[in-house]
Image: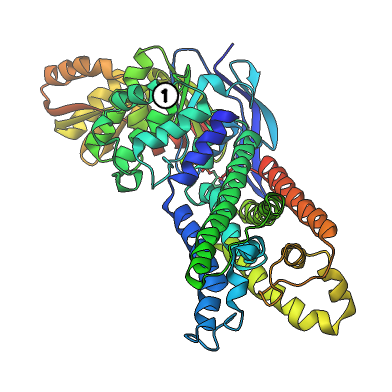
Amino acid sequence: MFPVETRELTKRYGQLVAVDRVSLTVRPGEVYGFLGPNGAGKTTTLRMLLGLVRPSSGTVRLFGEDVGQSLGDVGALIEGPAFYPYLSGRDNLRVLARYAGCPAGRVGVVLDLVDLTDRAGDRYGTYSLGMKQRLGVAAALLKDPKLLILDEPTNGLDPAGMADMRRLIRRLGAAGKTVLLSSHMLGEVQQICDRVGVVSGGRLIAESTVAELRGGARLRVVADPIQDAAARVRALVGQDRVRVEDGALELDIEAGKAAWINAELVGAGIDVSELGVRERELEDVFLELTHVG
Amino acid sequence: MLGSTRAEITKLVRRPASWLLLAVAVVLSLTFTYLVPYAGANGAADGAPNATRGVAETLPEHLVGNSIGGLPVFAGAILLILGVLAVGGEYGWGTWKTLLAQGPSRLTVYGAKIAAVALASLAVVLALFATGAVTSAAIAAAEGAPADWPSFVDLAAGIGAGWLMAAMWAGLGVVLAVALRGVALPIGLGLVWLMAVQNLLSAIAAPLLDWVAKLQEWLPGPNAGSLAASLGTSPDTPGVATLVGDGHAVAVLAGYLILFVGVGGLLLRRRDIL
Ligand SMILES: Nc1ncnc2c1ncn2[C@@H]1O[C@H](COP(=O)(O)OP(=O)(O)O)[C@@H](O)[C@H]1O
Ligand SMILES: [Mg+2]
């Protein structure tokens, strides 16, 4: 029984197909990255999971049950935090705890978890964006849910805030929670997630492990003379896997072969001044995936 | 449901706007029901509205009519705003998703809101009665006039009728907020209806057009005005006039209350939460 399983999930807004026959599966205990550029349909999909938006067609099952019956095991932060500005962070959570039917003691626990206890007595309206996001995560954790749905929780945070948020999510994943995390940042998903679903234009165009997605990372080699280096590497790995770009070699091979390439070039009397793995940009992955898919 | 209702009451009680609305309702009611007539009778404010009403009208004997007299129009407007704020705020702040993500069904949340708004409506009505009682007792004492309080039955009927009118207007606010998914437009349109259209219909259209006069008997404002009149509100109060019997008025007002709350619930249940 999967925490999340959708079949052919579709949402149309007039002519626009915001979510197009998405069938995705989130397995128990994994941190699943829901990756796609802005407007890909991530938020709409997550809203359908929670029953906020009705699918035009297709089905959603959470822990094997239809939507609307099983939110007891689900906590969610959808498209940015939203709370009552005139209440303190703590009172906001108290109000929500009443709705969730969970003991008031949870409020202090989740405030601690997101490191917001110090400012919990201040009005929500006075919070910085980072604090608002953390309060949003705290609210999602109120019920101590088995499944946590977080929609771009690092949006708008500064680098330190992003790092904090990622640490928190990793910790929750390590503690055994199933996490469905949407993001438009490949790097973020790579750092945190076990498996990834890639959406573009409403379609789920790939669902795989991060390792598979990252398989196409490139090796970048700066060598002198560059043309000799190119010829030598082409002989080693094949003509079509080597390109010369901006005075450097771009090799379409596994990162683990870097040492071998280096030894071969140096052995041939070529100076290697730089050797590194270049992650492909999200856009590259998308272009490739949309081509294949 | 009980936990949800308590949550909604907390949200209303802790919201500064709720207290501002209550204060405005009380101050306006006291000013135009007691202070202006009293000052007018003492020659201080000639020409002010209600200035010609005698001091007799402000005595405890008239507590019921005086306390509910504002509800057909201006106090009704305050309650409409209260209803809009209680529901529309969730759209304005985007907090529907935050609430619903905790697991309650939409109708549970809606029911809790209706309960909280109904209690708030009663609280406003009771505040109007209580402050009116204190003020009229003070006037009676100052004038050396007798303090003949209304009977318990009259008082209970007055509070009940006031609550019905108050809840009906708040219900109009609720359904407008759900239908228009916000705060500003529902308040604006609601006030245009209450303060302008109602007046135009009764003052201009009804005397000229027969069908408008007939229609008046089925509109919320004139029915609230009739109910207030039947309970002793002076007919020179805006919006107060005997058009229909009190049984008819109660039935129509209750019908509107059920209609508003029902339509609001249906819309909320059916539509996507964005
Ligand atoms: N309520 C709506 N009405 C019309 N179009 C919408 C609505 N919500 C989302 N969309 C459109 O659906 C597409 C997907 O949006 P969204 O799910 O928010 O994407 P993401 O979260 O991946 O950025 C976008 O083109 C967006 O403009
Ligand atoms: Mg989004």
> Residue A242 lies in what quarter of the image?
top left
Q: Is residue B26 visible?
A: yes
Comparing B235 with B251, the one in front is B235
Decide if residue B34 is on the left or right side of residue B157.
left
Relative to B130, does residue B65 appear above or below in the rendering?
Answer: below
**Residue drawn where x is 59% and y is 47% of the image:** B117
Query: Residue A242 or B45: which is nearer the viewer?
Result: B45
Q: Establish if A261 lies above or below B199.
A: above
Q: Chain of mark 1?
A: A
- Which of A168/B100 is in front? B100
Figure coloring = rainbow
Rendered residue at 20%/26% (across/down): A276
Residue B54, position as x, y percentages in the image: 60, 79
Q: Position of residue B84 (x, y in %)?
A: 58, 55
Report the residue at 31% width, 23% height from top: A113
Q: What's under tag 1, amino acid-wise? A: Ala
x and y percent of residue B145 in the render?
A: 56, 69
Q: Which residue is mark 1?
A: A104
